[in-house]
Image (spheres, coloured by chain):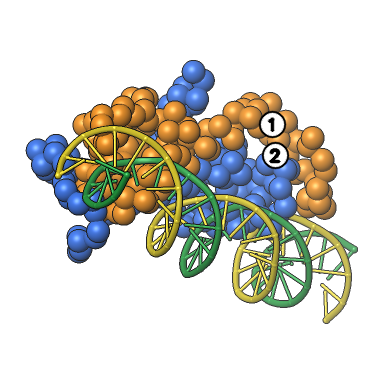
Chain colours: A orange, B blue, C green, D yellow
Amino acid sequence: MNEKIEICKTNIVNHGKVKKVNQALPKNREVVELSETFKVLSDPTRLRIVLALSMEELCVCDLATIVNISISAISHQLRLLKSRKLVTYRKEGKMVYYKLDDDHVVNLITQATEHVRE
Amino acid sequence: MNEKIEICKTNIVNHGKVKKVNQALPKNREVVELSETFKVLSDPTRLRIVLALSMEELCVCDLATIVNISISAISHQLRLLKSRKLVTYRKEGKMVYYKLDDDHVVNLITQATEHVRE
DNA sequence: ATTTCATTTGAATAGTTGCTCAAGTGTTAA
DNA sequence: TTAACACTTGAGCAACTATTCAAATGAAAT
């Protein structure tokens, strides 16, 4: 890994800084995982789903009403959130109730909200 | 806005919950802004750039070396980060030095890091 | 058994995104 | 003034994503 690619002629301007930053940066693996966490929350629909589920356990039908999107679209997003272990579900007859599996994410959203309100 | 779309037959299963959640959810505008904040950090390249700039002010050339990506690609991403007011720059002769404009984002990343490490 | 209904799923599609390539700025050095 | 260099920019493209549509599943009601 870390193959050379064409950079600028001088290649590196400030060796000291580059070395220092390179050592302090998280490993690739961790950066990718981090970015994937943010990616889940980067879509308005998914964000609304997470926000809604942070308040109440909800069935797919009610979620669709709240987020104002088709049942199918909600279901696809819930599938994604399920695979990322952000939500769990519980079946009750024909209906399926979803809830947050990971309250940690709500803190992230809260902090981002403060950031947006400036 | 809020046009009706085809939802399930019963339309709403639990009126009480739906009403409560609907009132508590942030306005569309705010949800979109929130998701856009997360979107900036949802790409590994941009995340690395932000992480690097949180440690040192860096020129485009050194940033490209650190992130291991072409100068052009870095420049495109910096343009985006500039437009979102996340970075500022300073010109010094031929070179351009970038730095974070908004330390707030670093807190977000720190908290997400804790979340990932579980 | 058949129908109804909540939900899931796969395929198709329009829109977005991150990168490369080639050309363009503007500044410094020769 | 010309050449070299750091960086920017626009077009083009391949990969990805969110949604829709149609069909499928599986539980309850008839």
- What residue type is disc 1 on? Asn
User: Where the N terminus of chain B falls, by quadrant?
Assistant: bottom left
| Residue drawn at the location 51% of the way across and 43% of the way down | B42
Residue B108 at what x, y percent from top left?
42, 33
Point out which mark residue A22 bears: 1
Specify the quadrant of the image occupied by residue A69.
bottom left
From the viewer's perspective, tell me whether residue A108 is left or right of residue B90: left
Residue closest to the eye, B77 or B58: B77
- What residue type is disc 2 on? Ile
| Residue drawn at the location 48% of the way across and 42% of the way down | A39
Residue A91 at what x, y percent from top left?
30, 29
Residue closest to the eye, B105 or A83: A83
Classify 10 Å Cα crowding around label 2: few (below 14), some (14-19), many (20 and above): many
Classify 10 Å Cα crowding around label 1: few (below 14), some (14-19), many (20 and above): some
Point out which mark residue B70 bears: none
Tag 2's secondary structure?
A: helix
Q: Which residue is denoted by mark 2 in the rendering?
A: B66
Q: Are marks 1 and 2 in contact (CB under 8 Å)?
A: yes
Q: Is C30 located above or below residue A101 in the figure?
A: below
In the rendered image, is residue B21 in sight? Answer: yes
| Residue drawn at the location 65% of the way across and 47% of the way down | B59
Residue B115 at what x, y percent from top left?
45, 24
From the viewer's perspective, tell me whether residue B91 is left or right of residue B5: right
